[in-house]
C-alpha cells in the first residue's frame, strides 16, 4: 500500500474495536482509551474481532481521514493485531 502521509508515530490499538464506529467513535477511543491526542502526527490502527479488517485514522491538517482495508484470505497472512 502506498502511503500518502509520513507519520511520526504509528499506534496499534490492541483491543477489539466495533467496526460500526466511524471517525467520531474512533476519535473517542484515541482520546479516552489510548489517552492520546488524535490531532498529532500519527496513524491510529484498529482491528476488528476476526482480525480480517483494519481501520486507520489520521489527521491530515485539513480534517480526519479514515482508511478501511478488508484483508483477503491467504494461506500465509501475518496480521497480529
Image (cartoon, rainbow, N blue to C red):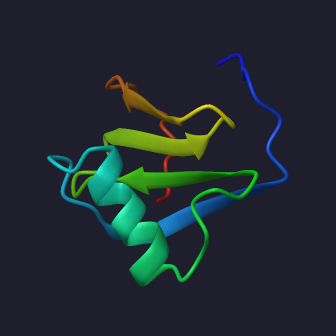
How many numbered discs, if any?
A: 0
Residue at 35% x, 68% y is: 28
Evaluate whether residue 72 shows in this view: yes
Q: Residue 38 in the image: x percent, y percent?
A: 57, 60
Residue at 79% x, 44% y is: 7
Looking at the image, which residue sits at the far top? 2
Q: Is residue 1 left or right of residue 19?
A: right
Looking at the image, which residue sits at the far front? 62
Q: Residue 43 in the image: x percent, y percent?
A: 64, 49
Q: Residue 81 in the image: x percent, y percent?
A: 46, 59
Q: Is residue 11 left or right of residue 73?
A: right
Residue at 39% x, 25% y is: 74
Q: Is residue 50 left or right of residue 77?
A: left
- Rendered position, 50 above or below 65: below
Evaluate whether residue 75 shows in this view: no
Quadrant (top left/top right/bottom left/bottom right) for the N terminus? top right
Residue at 83% x, 35% y is: 6
Q: Residue 34 in the image: x percent, y percent?
A: 51, 79
Which quadrant of the structure image shows residue 10? bottom right
Q: Nearer the viewer, residue 50 or 34?
A: 34
- Rendered position, 67 above or below 56: above
Which quadrant of the structure image shows residue 12? bottom right
Amino acid at each position: 500500500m502506498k502511503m500518502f502521509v509520513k507519520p511520526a508515530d504509528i499506534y496499534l490499538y490492541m483491543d477489539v474495536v466495533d467496526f460500526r464506529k466511524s471517525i467520531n467513535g474512533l476519535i473517542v477511543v484515541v482520546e479516552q482509551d489510548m489517552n492520546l491526542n488524535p490531532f498529532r502526527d500519527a496513524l491510529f490502527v484498529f482491528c476488528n474481532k476476526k482480525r480480517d479488517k483494519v481501520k486507520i485514522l489520521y489527521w491530515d491538517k485539513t480534517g480526519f481521514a479514515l482508511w478501511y482495508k478488508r484483508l483477503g484470505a491467504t494461506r500465509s497472512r501475518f496480521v497480529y493485531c
